Image (cartoon, coloured by chain):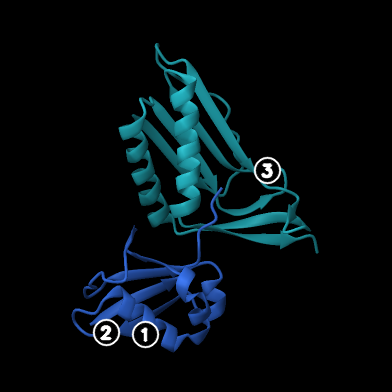
Amino acid sequence: MKVTVKFWSYFCDLTECDETSLEINEGATLGELHAAVMKKFPKLGEMKNSTLKAVGVHYQTDDFVLSEGDEVSLFPPVQGG
Amino acid sequence: MKTQLTITHHLIAESSYTMSDGMGAVVVFHGVVRSTEDGDPIRAIEYEANEAMTRRQFELIFEAIEKQWPVESIRLIHRTGEVAVNEASLRVEVIAPHRAEAFAACQFLIDEMKAKVPIWKRPVSLT
């Protein structure tokens, strides 16, 4: 199944794009998707432990099971204010 | 509880507020862009927001505040795009019956925002 991954802030610099699409297996988790994204964009691996992950408009943990058409966001720690 | 959330590229010019009888505290906080970032002088900060998620995360924070304090209203403005030094990037207005809950709710809101709301900044150097 296909999911879209959007990058924010300096993650766009590290990946040189603001989004990508990946084919993943049915039942794949957000953590598995993150691993696949880091394989595709190795520079994101340096930020592995501080990466925040969301599906749609909600934060999710690595064990979240993805569905066809999900829009995933990966980004660094937030800095509002 | 009434809430109003504005994400805008425009200068924050808000100054007035309205409240009902029985309210005795208005806390207004402005977050202002400092002239240095990590010790280096800057001209501005460029703010970027994942706007849909920002709106949802602020809604969750407002809901948490409503459960904890008797706040009548919250109005929040956060700027995006380039915000010059000495300009406000953030305005929070909390109206409540007493100062304790107004201050507490305002502090909670800003702490939660800094942990959860997907907004990022990028300093703009002088040159």
Viewed as shown, does residue B94 lie left or right of B34? left
Tell me the distance, in whole angstroms, between the alpha carbons under discs 1 and 2: 9 Å
Residue drawn at 45 percent across, 59 percent down = B50
Mark 3 Cα-neighbour bin, 10 Å: few <14, some 14–19, many ≥20: some
Could you tell me the amino acid type at mark 2?
A: Ile
For disc 3, the chain is B
Say which element carries label 1.
helix
Residue B26, x across and y down, in percent = 51, 23
Q: Which of marks 3 and 2 is in front?
A: 2
Residue A30, x across and y down, in percent = 30, 74
Q: Are marks 1 and 2 in contact (CB under 8 Å)?
A: yes
Could you tell me the amino acid type at mark 1?
A: Ala
Tell me the distance, in whole angstroms, between the alpha carbons under discs 3 and 1: 41 Å
Q: Which of marks 3 and 1 is in front?
A: 1
Name the residue tied to disc 2. Answer: A24
> Which disc is residue A36 wearing?
1
Residue drawn at 23 percent across, 82 percent down = A1
> Which of the 4 quarters of the picture holds residue B73?
top left
- What is chain B's hue in the picture? cyan
Say which element carries label 2.
loop
Could you tell me the amino acid type at mark 3?
A: Glu
Question: Which is nearer the eye, B10 or A55?
Answer: A55
Question: Which is nearer the eye, B10 or A3?
Answer: A3
Residue drawn at 32 percent across, 39 percent down = B63
- What is chain A's hue in the picture? blue
For disc 1, the chain is A
Name the residue tied to disc 3. Answer: B87
